[in-house]
């Protein structure tokens, strides 16, 4: 059961589109994975099952039920975002705010790897998925390799994503 203080902390503040989560919190990280799940415009049960099988909820530090709460809350919050053709348009500023909620360099690489796993799970790369991936690389100043494999304690990449794009 959630306390009143917790409800106040996680509730959407007036004038804000999305609720805020504490920096590096499991909910902040889970929301980025929820965004990856929805980046192609649909929620796929196979993607969710893949996260479960992979142990992603444990990696995020969140129980599966709490992940679903974050997913539900994100879907609820995003209805206040301007809609485009068949989907919602998250502004660059809004995305920057979501990425800024994860500061730990190791957690950023873990998340980039999870995002990579989600967006490639169906074998198709939608435009929204590609944009999300590149935005994560840019916001966190990572490299493409950081999303393919995670080695805890590996040096944090400083090459900007646009430089990395030149050889892909």
Image: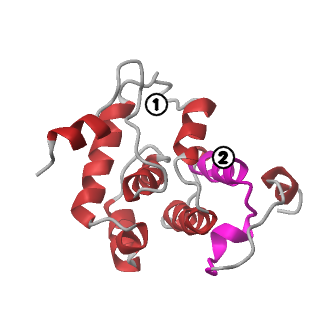
Left/right placement of residue 77 relative to residue 130 reads left
The number of numbered badges drawn on the structure is 2
Which corner quadrant holds the C terminus? bottom right
Measured as percent of width and height from the top left, residue 50 is found at: 39, 72
Measured as percent of width and height from the top left, residue 103 is found at: 59, 55
Q: Which mark is residue 88?
A: 1
Residue 70 falls inside the magenta stretch: no
Can you tell which quarter of the image residue 3 is in? Answer: top left
Label 1: state its secondary structure. loop
Measured as percent of width and height from the top left, residue 20 is found at: 41, 38
Residue at point 34%, 64% (across, down): 48
Q: Which mark is residue 135?
A: 2
Q: How dense is the environment of label 1, judged by Cα within 10 Å: few (below 14), some, or many (20 and up)?
A: some
Distance Cα–Cα, label 1 vs label 2? 16 Å
Q: How dense is the environment of label 2, judged by Cα within 10 Å: few (below 14), some, or many (20 and up)?
A: some
Q: Which numbered disc, 1 or 2, marks the residue that appears first in the sequence? A: 1
Q: Nearer the viewer, mark 1 or mark 2?
A: 2
Q: Residue furthest front?
A: 5
Q: Which residues are magenta?
A: 129-152
Label 2: state its secondary structure. helix
Residue at point 44%, 25% (across, down): 81
Left/right placement of residue 58 relative to residue 150 reads left
Measured as percent of width and height from the top left, residue 87 is found at: 45, 32
> Mainly helix, strand or loop, the magenta region?
helix
Q: Which mark is residue 166?
A: none
Residue at point 48%, 56% (across, down): 24
Can you tell which quarter of the image residue 67 is in? Answer: bottom left
Closer to us: 96 or 133: 96
């Amino acid at each position: 059961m959630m306390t009143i203080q917790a409800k106040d902390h996680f509730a959407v503040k007036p004038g804000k589109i999305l609720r805020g989560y504490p920096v590096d919190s499991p909910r902040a990280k889970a929301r980025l994975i929820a965004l990856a799940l929805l980046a192609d415009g649909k929620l796929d049960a196979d993607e969710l099952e893949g996260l479960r099988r992979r142990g992603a909820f444990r990696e995020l530090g969140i129980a599966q039920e709490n992940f679903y709460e974050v997913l539900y809350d994100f879907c609820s919050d995003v209805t206040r975002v301007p809609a485009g053709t068949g989907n919602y348009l998250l502004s660059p500023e809004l995305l920057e705010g979501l990425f800024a909620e994860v500061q730990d360099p190791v957690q950023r690489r873990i998340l980039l790897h999870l995002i990579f796993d989600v967006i490639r799970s169906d074998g198709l790369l939608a435009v929204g998925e590609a944009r999300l991936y590149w935005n994560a690389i840019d916001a966190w100043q990572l490299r493409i390799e950081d999303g393919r494999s995670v080695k805890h304690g590996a040096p944090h990449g400083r090459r900007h994503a646009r430089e990395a794009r030149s050889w892909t």
